[in-house]
């Protein structure tokens, strides 16, 4: 064997071997020559290695002498496995020759799942950080008028809602801790004034009621 070539082994599914048969009939080339052409074409066009389900039935194995440079470049493309890259080249040649190609749906590997989970986790973290940053940016640095005060309340309510979600989804023990640290009178006061602020008449009645309650406590 010449020092400029290296022997490589390819294992094809029956469907890919059938394409080789069709190309041999159409071009008159030997199957091994078609495989060499497929490697060159895949490298030249920077094709992605084919994704397909391996079928351990009626497969064919070919030993083909390839130029060393082509073999080395091809191995870098798909973790040392040449066949998926050759299949991409064979499919491209078949299309160029007008041969219909039915590609099998690619399988989803465990590696794909782990990669997608990592990407989803990163996107989720970035989105959460963005939402928090936007929420904090809405809080005015200084309360100077009613508009800035209203914006501050809105941002506080948004943050409070996110924090309360923890106890909504939590356990009975979590909610016990909530009741340990949060004064129900303070929570009741905040709830009542928020409700009153959405209606002016209701707010005036609330003011009178709180003033009356305050005076009564003083007299007592």
Image (cartoon, helix red, strand yellow):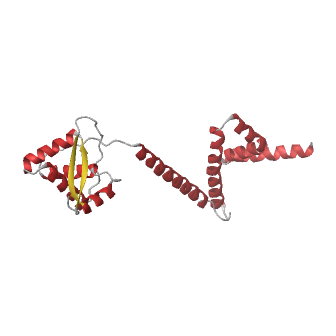
Q: Position of residue 22 (x, y in %)?
A: 12, 44
- Front residue of 96/75: it is 75
Q: Position of residue 219 (x, y in %)?
A: 92, 44
- Front residue of 184/209: it is 184
Horizontal arrangement in the rendering, residue 121 relative to residue 148 (left or right): left
The mark total stands at 0
Residue at image coords 21%, 39%: 14
Kindly tell me whether residue 12 is visible in this rendering.
yes
Q: Position of residue 58 (x, y in %)?
A: 22, 35
Q: Position of residue 59 (x, y in %)?
A: 23, 39
Horizontal arrangement in the rendering, residue 73 relative to residue 20 (left or right): right
For the N terminus, the image quarter is: bottom left
Horizontal arrangement in the rendering, residue 112 relative to residue 163 (left or right): left
Kindly tell me whether residue 100 is visible in this rendering.
no
Residue at image coords 21%, 57%: 66
For the C terminus, the image quarter is: top right
Residue at image coords 88%, 44%: 217
- Front residue of 220/187: it is 187
- Front residue of 145/93: it is 93
* Residue lying at the far front of the rendered structure: 1
């Amino acid at each position: 064997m010449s020092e400029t070539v290296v022997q490589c082994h390819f294992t094809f599914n029956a469907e890919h071997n059938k394409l080789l048969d069709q190309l041999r009939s159409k071009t008159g080339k030997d199957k091994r020559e078609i495989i060499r052409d497929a490697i060159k074409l895949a490298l030249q066009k920077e094709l992605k290695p084919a994704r397909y389900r391996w079928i351990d039935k009626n497969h064919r194995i070919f030993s083909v002498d390839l130029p060393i440079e082509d073999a080395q470049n091809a191995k870098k493309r798909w973790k040392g496995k040449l066949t998926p890259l050759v299949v991409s080249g064979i499919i491209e040649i078949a299309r160029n020759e007008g041969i219909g190609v039915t590609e099998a749906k690619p399988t989803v590997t465990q590696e794909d799942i782990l990669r997608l989970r990592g990407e989803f986790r990163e996107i989720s973290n970035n989105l959460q950080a963005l939402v928090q940053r936007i929420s904090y940016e809405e809080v005015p640095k200084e309360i100077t008028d009613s508009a800035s005060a209203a914006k501050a309340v809105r941002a506080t309510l948004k943050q409070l809602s996110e924090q309360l979600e923890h106890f909504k989804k939590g356990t009975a023990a979590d909610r016990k801790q909530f009741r340990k640290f949060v004064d129900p009178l303070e929570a009741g006061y905040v709830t009542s004034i928020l409700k009153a602020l959405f209606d002016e008449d209701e707010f005036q009645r609330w003011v009178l009621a709180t003033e009356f309650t305050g005076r009564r406590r003083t007299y007592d």
